[in-house]
Image (cartoon, helix red, strand yellow):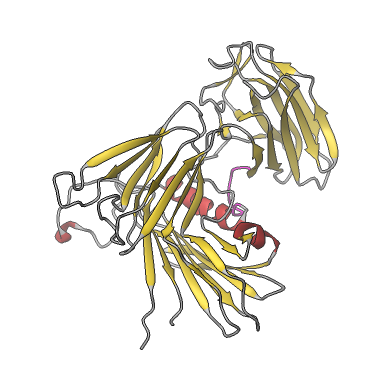
Amino acid sequence: MSMQPCTVLTLVLFSIAAPALGAAYIPAVPPEDAVMADAEDLRDIQYWAEEAFLGALPAEASRIRLEVLRQDHNVLRFGQSCMETPIKIGTREFVHGLGTHANSELLAHIPENAMAFKAFVGVDNNDDTGGLRGSVRFFVHAGDAVLYESPVKRGGEEASEVLVELSPGTAALLLRADMTDDGVGHDQCDWADAHFIMADGSVRYLDEHQAPLLLDTARPPFSFRCGDRDGAALLAGWTRDVAREETDGARVLRITWTDPDSNLAVIAEVKAFKQYPAADWVVYFENRGSAPTAVISDIQALDVSLRTGHPRKAAVLHELEGDACGMTSFLLKQEELATGKEIRRAPTGGRPSSISAFPWFDFEYEGQGFIGAIGWTGQWASHFARAENGPTRARAAPSAIETSWPNSPAAVTLTAARAGSASSAALQSPSA
């Protein structure tokens, strides 16, 4: 009887430490106390799972969906500048708004019954721009039409008002901020007080109810290559079917992407739990065609962008020393991750906690982060790479896995889960 190899990667995104009181003190039903997540935290994780895997918010979501199509520096911030300071243009401060950096393109999906869009635009006044530096031009597009175009806005100038009426049937606005001829330096800029004016006279701010986690939602939190092509790009062009189910403990999504040419299917089963700020996903790769597939390689159980935006603020990787059978075994250590730098970790000799790495880490940035524990009992690798413009890409997986499938049905399973303030990932290949 053939054995079925299996790898497991565990990633803890939200961790709360409490004294261990023994099994007799563990309640069968989670108590509603200060340790448990509140309704807002649970909702944020459910929305994160929907947006990451489906590219859309659920119908009941109260926030306006925003897509960052481009941002060359830092990350988009809500209610603050991209330098993580209060929004200020000229001498005026704003409570609401979007903090970005040229060059950027933000797609704002228009809510039903919206009649107009209004904002104030300009270069953000912070310690870096000094109320003097930076120059940006702002544009509002609806499809091919340009609805608004600003003059060149320079550091220290007061904000310019944007007010555009929305034509029936307009689904989204593209908010664009461009650098000028003097380059991109100090081009931190704001769509201050950005909001839609509704038919009943109420307003909906674009930053309101936004609760971005450290993990981004730009694409599903796993990756692979098929032949010489990136999996995310392939999935975007394949047919997609979505089935939903409600259980007592979770909202369940089953998403199937199918290549119309080869009949290769990628199936994601996603659970967003109702009692814990956690999501669980299992991804299957299945050959439903009559010919061999291309080689499936570089399968990453975790592949996400982290919102480490400020280029002069370091992220910190907290971890333990690996087991060297000596005094240094399991000692705490930490390493800062500055822009343009990377951190790679892998154990020695195929054992998960041997000498050079321990399968646990705590990635921290400005009060946010996630704690990871890799549960695969063999060789693994993690990689944190921070770009010059701020964001970090985090990847983790068992080492060196690739496969191709013959024309008989076969499947490889990739799972990633977060349960009870923890997330796990497992990669399983078919029987030999």
Magenta stretch: dominant secondary structure: loop
**Which sits in the foreground, 183 or 248?**
183
Q: Quadrant of residue 134?
A: top right
The answer to whether 340 is drawn above or below residue 281 in the figure is above
The answer to whether 64 is drawn above or below residue 227 in the figure is above
Residue at 54% from the left image edge and 39% from the top image edge = 209
User: As drawn, which residue projects farthest toward the front?
Assistant: 349
Whether residue 429 is in magenta: the answer is no
The C terminus is located in which quarter? bottom left
Residue 405: percent from the left, percent from the top? 56, 78
Residue 288: percent from the left, percent from the top? 62, 80
In-image side of 145 versus 344 (left or right): right
Q: Is residue 221 visible?
A: yes
The N terminus is located in which quarter? bottom left
User: As drawn, which residue projects farthest toward the right?
Assistant: 145
In-image side of 172 versus 257 (left or right): right
Residue 49: percent from the left, percent from the top? 52, 55
Q: Is residue 423 visible?
A: no
Residue 364: percent from the left, percent from the top? 38, 38
The answer to whether 221 is drawn above or below residue 306 in the figure is below
Whether residue 63 is in magenta: the answer is yes
Residue at 49% from the left image edge and 36% from the top image edge = 308
Q: Quadrant of residue 118?
A: top right
Number of marks in the rendered image: 0
**Which sits in the foreground, 215 or 410?**
410
In-image side of 339 versus 140 (left or right): left
**Which sits in the foreground, 413 or 278?**
413
User: Which portion, as a residue range, is magenta?
Assistant: 57-64
User: As drawn, which residue projects farthest toward the bottom?
Assistant: 1
**Which sits in the foreground, 118 or 409?**
409
